[in-house]
Image (cartoon, rainbow, N blue to C red):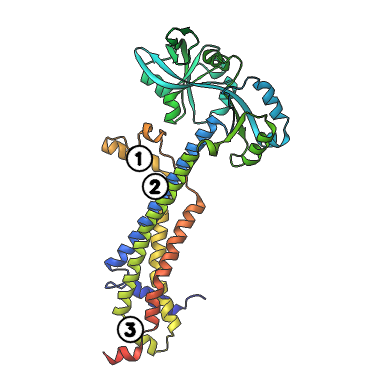
Amino acid sequence: MLFSRLEKKVAYRYLWAKKRGFGSVVSWVSLIGIMLGVATLIVVMSVMGGFHDVLLGRIIGMNGHIVVYHQDGAISDYNYLIDKIRQNKVVMAETVSIVPIAEGQVMVTAKGRNSGAMIRGINMYDLIAKTDEGARFYGKALSEIKDGELVVGASLARNLGVTINDELSLVSANGSTPTPFGSMPRIVSYPLKTSFFMGMYEYDSGYIFLPLETAQKYLNIGKSVTHIDLFLKDAEKTTAVRESLMRLLPDGFIVRDWRDLNRGFVGALQVESNVMFLILMLIIIVAVFNIVSSLVMLVKDKAKDIAVLRTFGVSRKSMMKIFVLSGSTIGVIGATAGTILGTIIAIYIEPIRKFFQWLTGRDLFPAELYYLSELPSKVEFWTVFGIALIAIVLAFLATLYPAWKAANTDPVEVLRNE
């Protein structure tokens, strides 16, 4: 048995002592500090994890896990290239789909308003397969979109003041009509047939999808595409596929995976997550130091009791276990309460955000700043368990010095001075 009945009884009696134990202000500050530190850390790490998964999931989901470019800017015989890729067993063992894309930057105008946008030509059945369950479409079904019709982000359509069947003019600087003053901009009008909401502001406010043939004609690239996207079964297994493609494709082709294309973004998320973990861990460390001061004062206050117990035969080991149990209990209670509180807040973070937004009348999570319309959260068991375990271990370590001091109290010296 780890603790004897006497050790438990004495430890809990000291714990609930009003002057220096659990009833003291210092002990309550320690417990509340650990609780708030653990809860805050769980909430922040869950939100950071949610941001990481949702943002990367949507960015990767729309752009492909691996992207094949050509140094000349266009891939002419892309059907032959796709067939060649499909003949490679290593690549196809991990690949779900291969999607040709024709993409370019334009300025879109309507009703006297204008905005920058990215047009992306894609086969509509590929777009249907690429969009996740959270995406919503309004107007004509994607499967019914024809040549010369647009699918526009809901935020972009709202900013331009257009609705279904309104005309939008696409303006590209890459014109084809030469003049004495240079090329004239290419301006073509298309009807808006469908609007979409993906929950990611970057796409909802800046992307226009259209049939691949329409994009090829507008971009004046003939039957070519700008790049080819490969979607894999597992986004983490890109290395083998990428290396196989680099050996397979002729000179002039460039192969990039999602880590290369989003290196700065992924790195920033990881650094921010690590920094936030270290900063918030300081809250727990400060609370743990309060346990040290509380137990040191308790040892000093109970010096006479400790001397009497030692005189009656209680060993140094037992005295040490008494104070370890007393201090660790504060850590366990604080960590448990913090884990419960933090998990509940992390699970219901979006309703809580909406409540405070309603209460303050301010937008606490602007979509144009964070690129998401909802505050994401991902509660992982091992993350929560790890945070709680760290708090308990730190609380246990904080008890060792006061417990050692209590165990080394000289009963003869203490009783002589009484």
Q: Is residue 105 left or right of residue 287?
A: right
Q: CA distance from mark 2 to mark 1?
A: 10 Å
Residue 345's tag is 2
The residue at 73%/30% (across/down) is: 87
Residue 203's tag is none
Residue 276 location, x and y as percent?
40, 50
Please give the residue where the numbered disc 3 appears in the rendered image. 305
Residue 324 location, x and y as percent?
41, 73
Q: How many marks?
A: 3
Please give the residue where the numbered disc 1 appears in the rendered image. 353
Residue 281 location, x and y as percent?
39, 57
Answer yes or no: do the residues labelled 2 and 1 have beta carbons within 8 Å? Answer: no
Mark 3, residues whose alpha carbon is within 10 Å: few (<14), some, or many (≥20)?
some
Residue 240 location, x and y as percent?
66, 40
* Amino acid type indicated by mark 3: Asp
Q: Secondary structure at mark 3?
A: helix
The residue at 33%/59% (across/down) is: 32
The residue at 51%/52% (across/down) is: 381
Which badge, 3 or 1, is on the more N-terminal residue? 3
**Residue 9 appears in the rendering:** no
* Amino acid type indicated by mark 1: Arg
The part of the image, by quadrant, that contains residue 106 is: top left
Considering only vertical position in the picture, is 29 above or below 273? below
Which badge, 2 or 1, is on the more N-terminal residue? 2
* Amino acid type indicated by mark 2: Ile
Considering only vertical position in the picture, is 295 above or below 169? below
Q: Quadrant of the C terminus?
A: bottom left
Q: CA distance from mark 3 to mark 2?
A: 43 Å
Q: Secondary structure at mark 1?
A: helix
Q: Is residue 83 left or right of residue 304?
A: right
Which badge, 3 or 2, is on the more N-terminal residue? 3
